[in-house]
C-alpha cells in the first residue's frame, strides 16, 4: 500500500488557485524529489500536506497511511508521523530547543498512547542526534531558532526530524542557505534515516543536493501541476536545459 | 475557508477551577462601614488601644476622601460604583481557630486548602514552604513556626503579631504606606482584619520560602488583609503569596496593603501569584483587586524585589513600588499580567530614587486576550539627592486576537542630571506562522499558545522560586485556554 496518495489536488490561498490538480504517489522506503520554478506551488503543496489552514483545498483527495489526510489538523498529521522541514523556520523566543523538542516528542507519544519521556530518557538520544548532525551543544541551550543563522535554522529542522522520527518527511528547500560542508552533513543525516518504513519528499532547486541524497523519482511541478516525472537523470536534464523545456512539454496537445 | 484564527476561536472554554465554596459557619458583622464596625473589629481581635486609634484615624480620613471624590479615577479601568455600605467588613470561620494546632481546625477548611494544593499538613511540610493561610478575614494556620522561631524569625498572622509583638508592629505599621496614602489604603487601615507578619532579625537568612495563601470564601465580603515584612540589617527573606476565590456573580472587593521594610544590607524578595476569580466570559462577577504594595529600602545596600504573576481578578489596580532611600539600594519589579475575556488590569510600579547610586530594574510582560485590556503604568522618579541613579525599564506586550488592548504609560521624572535611564518597549502578536510551526511538531493549538506565552514571560518566571515558576506556567496555560481569537 502506498504511504501517500495524492489525487487531483487543487488548493488556493486567498482565492487564488495555486495547486491545479496534483497527482503523486509515494511508497514507504522511497525518496521523491520535487523541482520546479519559483512560485510554481512547491511550498504550497508541502504546507497543504502539513494541513496549514490558510490554504483551502477545493478539490481532490489525499490518503496518508490509508487515512484521509485532508480531514486532519496539523497536529494530528504530525502525530501520525508527517514531518515538514520548513523553508523558513520560525523563531520561538524564550523556549529552549531541548525543552521544545522534548515537549513535541511527548505530545506525539501521548497521541500514540505511549509513556512520556523524562529528561533522562531524552538526553542520550538527543546527544546522539546532535552528534549525527555535528551541531553545537551551545546552540541547544538557546531559544528555538532565535538568532540562528540561516544555515543553523535549516540544520535544526533536520535535527528535529531526526528526533521525531517521522514516517513521511517533507523537506522544503532544506539545502538553500547551507554551505558545502553543512549540505554534506545534512544529507548524511537524511541518508542515515532512510529506511524501508520511511519516505521522503525533497523539494529543491539544485541538482547538487541530489548528488548526496539520491532520489528514486524526480517530479517537476510547474504552475500547480506535475508536468514530468522520471528518475534521478531528470534532475541532470533540468540542470542542463532549464524549466522552459518542461513547460513546453506541459502544453496540452 | 477556515483560518487559524477561527480555529482558535473554537477552542473549548475552560472553567475557573478554584471556584468552589466551602460550607462553614461564619461569624460576621453586619454590612456597612462606620465607627461602630471598626470598634467591633478591633474588639473581636482584642487589639491594644493604639491599634484602635490608628484605625479610627484611618476611617475618618477615608470618610473625608469618600465625601470628596470616592475612588481614584485616573486608572485606565471602568467599573460601576461600589457601595461601601453594602459590604461585610469582617467574616471569620466561627470556630475560633487555635493557631498552634491544625487538629482543631475545621476539617472543611483543611479540605479547602487541600483542594487548592497548599501544603498545610504536617507530613507535607517537607516541601520546605512555610504557609500562613488567610481564610476570608482570619489567618487560620501558620506552619513551620517552631523551626523559624529557633532562628528568631517571626512569621505569624497579623493579629497574633499585634498581640505578641506590639512594639514591632507599632514601629513599622504605616511607615511605608501611611493610612493617608490613598483611598483604598485608608479603607484597608480602618477595617483590615488579618494578614501576615514577618520579622527577620539581624544577619539571619530565612532558610525557607515563607508563603501566605489568601482565600475569599464568604459572599458579599470584602477581604482587607495587611502584610508587613521587616528585614533587619543583613537579613534575607523570600516571601510568596497566592490567592483564589469562589465563583460568584457579584463583584467582591479585595483591598490589601503590603509594606516591606529593608534595613542596611537587607534583602526582601516578594513574589505573588494572583489568581482571584476573574469573572465569567461576559464579565459578570469577579474580584476587584485594588491593592497598595510598597517597599522601602531604608538602609544602605538594601534590595527589594517584587515579582508578580497576575492572571485573576476582574479588575487589577496595583503598583508594587520601591522607595530607594538608602545609598546603593536596589529595587526590582518583574511582572506578568494577563487579561482575558473582559478582565482589566492597570498595573505597574513606582521606583523612587532618593539615595546615591540607587538602581532599579523594571521588566513587565503584558498579555491581552479575548476582550482583555492591559495597561502598564510606571513611574521612575530620580530625586535631586540621587546622584548616580540608574533605571532600566522594559515593557513588552503580547496580543492574542483582535479585540484586546495593550496600553503603556511610562512616567519619568528626573531631577538629577547624573541619572542614567534606559527604556525599551515592544508590542507583538502571536503569529499564525508560529502556531502552525508548533502544531506541525505535534502540539495542540492551546499548547502552542501556552508555549509561546511562556517563552514571552521567561525573563519574569526566572525570578520566581522554582516550584512557583512551574505553578505560574500552568496557571497561564489554564487562564489562556479558550482565550484565543
Ligand atoms: N496569500 C496569497 N495570495 C496570493 N498568492 C499567493 C499567496 N500566498 C502565496 N501565493 C502565491 O502562490 C504561489 C506559489 O507559492 P509557493 O510558495 O508554493 O511557491 P514555491 O514553488 O515554493 O516557490 P519557491 O521556489 O520560490 O519557494 C506564488 O506565486 C505565490 O506568490
Ligand atoms: Mg517554496
Image (cartoon, coloured by chain):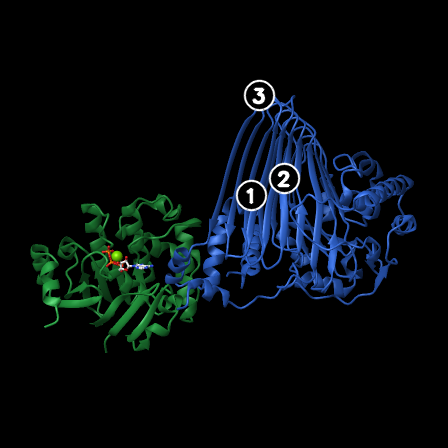
Q: Is residue A15 above or below residue B187?
A: below
Which chain has been coloured green in this picture? Answer: A
The residue at which mark 2 appears reads as B349
Which numbered disc flags the more N-terminal residue, 2 or 3?
2
Measure the C-alpha gap from mark 1 to mark 2: 10 Å
Q: Nearer the viewer, residue B260 or B420?
A: B420
Question: Mark 2 packing: few (<14 Cα in 10 Å), some, or many (20+)?
Answer: many
Question: Is there any visible trace of residue A214 in the rendered image?
Answer: yes
The residue at which mark 3 appears reads as B417
Q: Quadrant of residue B376?
A: top right
Q: Nearer the viewer, residue B65 or A24?
A: B65
The residue at which mark 1 appears reads as B364
Question: Horizontal placement of B320 versus A184: left or right?
Answer: right
Which numbered disc flags the more N-terminal residue, 1 or 2?
2
The answer to whether dots 1 and 2 both sit on one chain is yes
Q: Position of residue A146 (x, y in %)?
A: 38, 46
Helix, strand or loop status at disc 1 = strand
Which numbered disc flags the more N-terminal residue, 1 or 3?
1
Q: Colour of chain B?
A: blue
Amino acid at each position: 500500500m502506498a504511504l501517500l496518495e495524492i489525487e487531483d489536488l487543487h488548493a488556493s490561498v486567498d482565492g487564488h488557485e495555486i495547486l491545479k490538480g496534483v497527482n503523486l504517489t509515494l511508497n514507504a522506503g522511497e525518496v521523491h524529489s520535487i523541482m520546479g520554478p519559483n512560485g510554481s506551488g512547491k511550498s504550497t503543496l508541502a504546507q497543504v500536506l502539513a494541513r496549514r489552514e490558510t490554504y483551502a483545498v477545493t478539490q481532490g483527495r489525499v490518503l496518508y497511511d490509508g487515512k484521509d489526510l485532508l480531514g486532519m489538523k496539523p497536529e494530528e498529521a504530525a502525530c501520525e508521523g508527517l514531518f515538514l522541514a520548513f523553508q523558513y523556520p520560525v523563531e520561538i523566543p524564550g523556549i529552549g530547543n531541548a525543552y521544545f523538542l522534548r515537549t513535541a516528542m511527548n505530545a506525539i507519544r501521548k497521541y500514540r498512547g505511549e509513556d512520556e519521556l523524562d529528561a533522562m530518557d531524552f538526553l542520550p538520544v538527543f546527544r546522539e542526534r546532535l552528534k549525527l548532525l555535528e551541531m553545537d551543544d551551545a546552540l541547544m541551550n538557546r531559544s528555538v531558532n532565535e538568532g540562528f543563522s540561516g544555515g543553523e535554522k535549516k540544520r535544526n529542522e533536520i535535527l528535529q526530524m531526526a528526533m521525531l522520527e517521522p514516517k513521511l518527511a517533507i523537506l522544503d528547500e532544506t539545502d538553500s542557505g547551507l554551505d558545502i560542508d553543512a549540505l554534506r552533513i545534512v544529507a548524511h543525516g537524511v541518508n542515515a534515516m532512510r529506511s524501508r518504513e520511511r519516505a521522503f519528499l525533497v523539494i529543491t532547486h539544485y541538482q547538487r543536493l541530489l548528488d548526496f541524497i539520491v532520489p528514486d523519482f524526480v517530479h517537476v511541478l510547474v504552475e500547480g501541476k506535475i508536468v514530468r516525472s522520471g528518475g534521478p537523470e531528470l534532475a541532470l536534464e533540468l540542470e542542463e536545459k532549464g524549466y522552459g523545456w518542461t513547460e513546453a512539454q506541459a502544453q496540452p496537445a | 475557508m477556515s483560518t487559524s484564527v477561527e480555529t482558535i476561536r473554537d477552542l473549548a472554554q475552560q472553567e475557573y477551577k478554584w471556584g468552589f465554596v466551602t460550607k462553614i459557619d461564619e461569624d460576621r458583622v453586619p454590612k456597612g462601614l462606620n465607627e461602630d464596625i471598626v470598634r467591633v473589629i478591633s474588639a473581636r481581635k482584642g487589639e491594644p488601644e493604639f491599634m484602635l486609634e490608628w484605625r479610627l484615624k484611618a476611617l475618618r480620613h477615608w470618610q473625608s476622601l469618600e465625601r470628596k471624590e470616592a475612588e481614584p479615577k485616573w486608572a485606565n479601568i471602568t467599573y460601576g460604583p461600589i457601595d461601601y455600605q453594602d459590604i461585610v467588613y469582617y467574616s471569620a470561620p466561627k470556630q475560633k481557630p487555635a493557631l498552634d494546632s491544625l487538629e482543631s481546625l475545621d476539617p472543611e477548611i483543611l479540605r479547602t486548602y487541600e483542594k487548592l494544593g497548599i501544603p498545610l499538613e504536617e507530613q507535607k511540610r517537607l516541601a520546605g514552604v512555610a504557609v500562613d493561610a488567610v481564610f476570608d478575614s482570619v489567618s487560620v494556620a501558620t506552619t513551620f513556626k517552631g523551626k523559624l522561631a529557633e532562628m528568631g524569625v517571626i512569621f505569624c498572622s497579623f493579629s497574633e503579631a499585634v498581640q505578641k509583638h506590639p512594639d514591632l508592629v507599632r514601629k513599622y505599621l504605616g511607615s511605608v504606606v501611611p493610612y493617608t496614602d490613598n483611598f483604598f489604603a485608608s479603607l484597608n487601615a480602618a477595617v483590615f482584619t488579618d494578614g501576615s507578619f514577618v520579622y527577620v532579625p539581624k544577619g539571619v537568612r530565612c532558610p525557607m520560602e515563607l508563603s501566605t495563601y489568601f482565600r475569599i470564601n464568604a459572599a458579599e465580603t470584602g477581604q482587607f488583609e495587611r502584610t508587613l515584612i521587616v528585614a533587619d540589617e543583613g537579613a534575607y527573606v523570600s516571601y510568596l503569596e497566592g490567592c483564589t476565590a469562589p465563583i460568584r456573580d457579584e463583584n467582591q472587593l479585595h483591598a490589601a496593603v503590603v509594606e516591606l521594610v529593608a534595613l542596611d544590607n537587607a534583602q526582601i524578595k516578594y513574589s505573588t501569584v494572583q489568581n482571584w476569580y476573574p469573572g465569567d466570559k461576559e464579565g459578570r462577577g469577579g474580584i476587584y483587586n485594588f491593592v497598595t504594595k510598597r517597599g522601602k529600602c531604608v538602609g544602605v545596600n538594601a534590595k527589594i524585589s517584587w515579582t508578580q504573576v497576575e492572571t485573576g481578578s476582574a479588575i487589577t489596580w496595583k503598583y508594587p513600588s520601591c522607595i530607594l532611600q538608602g545609598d546603593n539600594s536596589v529595587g526590582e519589579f518583574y511582572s506578568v499580567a494577563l487579561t482575558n475575556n473582559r478582565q482589566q488590569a492597570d498595573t505597574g510600579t513606582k521606583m523612587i530614587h532618593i539615595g546615591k547610586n540607587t538602581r532599579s530594574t523594571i521588566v513587565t510582560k503584558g498579555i491581552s486576550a479575548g476582550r482583555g485590556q492591559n495597561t502598564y503604568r510606571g513611574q521612575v522618579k530620580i530625586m535631586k539627592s540621587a546622584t548616580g541613579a540608574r533605571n532600566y525599564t522594559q515593557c513588552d506586550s503580547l496580543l492574542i486576537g483582535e479585540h484586546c488592548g495593550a496600553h503603556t504609560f511610562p512616567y519619568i521624572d528626573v531631577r538629577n542630571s547624573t541619572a542614567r535611564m534606559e527604556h525599551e518597549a515592544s508590542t507583538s502578536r502571536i503569529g499564525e506562522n508560529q502556531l502552525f510551526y508548533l502544531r506541525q511538531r505535534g502540539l495542540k493549538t492551546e499548547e502552542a499558545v501556552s508555549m509561546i506565552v511562556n517563552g514571552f514571560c521567561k525573563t519574569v518566571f526566572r525570578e520566581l522560586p522554582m516550584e512557583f515558576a512551574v505553578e505560574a506556567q500552568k496557571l497561564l496555560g489554564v487562564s489562556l485556554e479558550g482565550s484565543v481569537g
